[in-house]
Structures are given as C-alpha cells and as structure tokens.
Amino acid sequence: MSEALDTIRDETEAAIAAAADLRALDAVRVAALGKSGRVTGLLKTLGALAPEERRSFGAAVNALKGEVERALDQRRTALEAAALEARLAAERMDVSLPPRPFPSAGAEAGAIHPISRTMEELIALFGAMGFAVAEGPDIEGDWYNFTALNIPAHHPARQDHDTFYLPAPKSGGDSPRPVLRTHTSPVQIRTMLAQEPPIRVIVPGRTWRADHDATHSPMFHQVEGLVIGRDITLGHLKGCLTDFLRAFFGIADLPVRFRSSYFPFTEPSMEVDIGWNRKTGELGAGGDWLEILGSGMVHPKVLANAGVDPKVWQGFAFGMGIERITMLKHGIPDLRPFYEADLRWLRHYGTSPLSPFNLHDAA
C-alpha cells in the first residue's frame, strides 16, 4: 500500500511541476482529486479494510491528499503570477515613443471633419481676396452682442427663449447678464475698436441659439465678413459674394440674386439667394432660388458705436452658417450627425488629412 501511495505522490507531483498553464494544472487536479481521481479512488477502498488497517491507511491517504492540494495551490500561484507578468509585458506602452503615423487608407484612417474642411476653404478663398481672420470670446457682454450692433431691447433675439444667458456677476448690480454669443458679429465691433480702418476680416467661429432639430443645433458655426474703407459700395459687396459663392460651390455660372431685406446692423440690407432645382436639390440648375446668407452696408450707428466716423468710412458685412453651406455643398440632409461622433459618417463625408485645401479645388 505504501508503495502505491509513493507512486501516486511522485507521479502527481511530476505532473503538477510539468503543467504549463492553469488549464493543464486543472487537468492534473481532476486526475488526482476528482470523482474518479487516483487519490479519491484510494479513499473509496477504505471500507473494505480491517479497522486497524483502515485507520492507518486512511491517515496516509489523507496526508497524501493534503500534499497534493498544497502542491496544486503553489503551482497555481506561480502560474497566475507568470500569466500576469506575460500580460503586463504584452500590453506595456512606452509613452516615450513617438505616436504611430496615421494610415493613409483603410478602416483606421483619420479624416478632417466637414466643418473644419469648410473653414479651411473659407479662410483660403477669402484670404485670396485680402481678408484676415479675426477671433473673439465665446462668452460676450450684452453691449458687444446686441447694443453696439443696433439691436433694440425688444428684439426677439434678446429673449430668454432664444438666447443662452449666464448668471450675472455677484457684484454686477443691474448690469446685463453675460451671453453665449448668438453670432460672430461682436468680433466685428471688437475689431473696429481695436484697429483703424481700412479693415477687411472674416470671423469664423462657434455660436449658440436655443434651437434643435434636423436643420438647427444649439451650438453651430458661423462666418461673418467685414470690409471698411473710404469708398466701399454695394457693388463691392455684390462682386465679393458672387465670386465667393461661385468659387466655393465650384459652379462658374452659379446664379446669384440679391434682394432687399432688413437687419438692425446693416442699411440697406440684402438677402443673397442662389439658383437651384427645388425638386432635385441640384445647385445652379432649375428656376428656383435658395436663400444662402444675409448681407448689407454697415449701419452708420454701428460704425459710430465702434468709434468709426460714418461720414468718412463706409463698409459692408455679411454672415452665413458654416453647417448650412457645408450641407448644401456635400449633399448632407441632416445637421445632427455633424455632432454625433459617428466614425462611419465621418469617413464618408470627411477629407483626408493629407489633402489640404487648394484654391484650384474651387475653380
């Protein structure tokens, strides 16, 4: 009997030491201690032995069982530690290494968002006309956002249901509340206050209004333009916008129409329409018109509010939604996917980062 115990002990310990992983070790455990295991089989034979022999042999078998269990536990601990070390080595990241280059194609290739692409195009096209880029804060004061632009106190844009206001400063007394700018026009005021005419700038950036549906978002992007000079006329405005629209949409004979409108900050004011086909949505075709942007000659009160003498200087301004012109150019039917971070949508409408905008793209 003792020889049988020694044989089982030696063979089991050898199998435990040879187990290369936790699955192999569990197989050794089952072979030794399972319902049909070798050690379990010895325990089943105790009932056929004499009382004295059963007592001594049972104690030996239980001791063997304890030795096997301890050996299994020790080997399991060693294998788990080795597996953890291997995983840590395999998943190790060397933060000192340079970033991996983006692949040029395939599922993992990056893409420039359509809004960013349109901003690049706007800056390039207007830059070729001599426009600089001006920037300003997203959180504006009431004077810059409304009053200086000749927007009256009763105007709907100044109501809480249209505009996002922030809490007034604790020490502000009766001063107006700060506002998330509803347009990029405040930067026009800041530019006129900061530099002497002549001025020629565009102002791309984020704006906020309380709208949200398939064609409106609480946060969206606008680009506005401002030109101030001594002899600026409506002819300059029409020529500038007509050239821009035809270049941006890539249609050399794109029909462009200017019609009278009203904006508090321009006088006279004009809506700008482009030709399109209402049934097919094709730009430049059909006999229909699509409103695309607002424009006009800068109101004398706005010039005076910004410290510019309206008797000496004149100018024009215009503004348009960047999402809107992007949707029209690329045939995107819904505004909401612009902000849903859907990689499939971005790969479809995005532009390769290795393909920067070229002025010839719009020719």
Image (cartoon, rainbow, N blue to C red):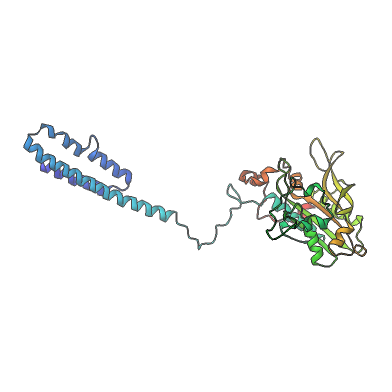
- In the picture, which quadrant includes the N terminus? top left
Judge from the rendering whether residue 273 lies leftward or rightward of residue 66; answer left or right: right
The correct choice, above or below, for 6 with respect to 193 in the image is: above
Residue 359 visible, this angle: no
The image quarter containing residue 193 is: bottom right
Q: Nearer the viewer, residue 130 or 340?
A: 340
Judge from the rendering whether residue 5 lies leftward or rightward of residue 130; answer left or right: left
The correct choice, above or below, for 38 with respect to 208 in the image is: above
Q: Residue furthest bottom?
A: 196
Q: Nearer the viewer, residue 205 or 88?
A: 205
Locate residue 219, reporting x and y percent: 70, 49
Judge from the rendering whether residue 9 lies leftward or rightward of residue 251; answer left or right: left
Q: Nearer the viewer, residue 220 or 100?
A: 220
Locate residue 362, reporting x and y percent: 78, 52
Residue drawn at point x = 90 percent, y = 62 percent: 310
The correct choice, above or below, for 138 with respect to 53 in the image is: below
Locate residue 114, reporting x and y percent: 69, 49
Residue drawn at point x = 62 percent, y = 44 percent: 342
Counting labels gives 0
Q: Nearer the viewer, residue 264 or 215?
A: 264
The image quarter containing residue 215 is: top right
Residue 209 visible, this angle: yes
Residue drawn at point x = 79 percent, y = 50 percent: 320
The correct choice, above or below, for 339 with respect to 286 in the image is: below
Locate residue 71, reporting x and y percent: 23, 48
Judge from the rendering whether residue 197 lies leftward or rightward of residue 77; answer left or right: right
Q: Residue furthest front?
A: 173
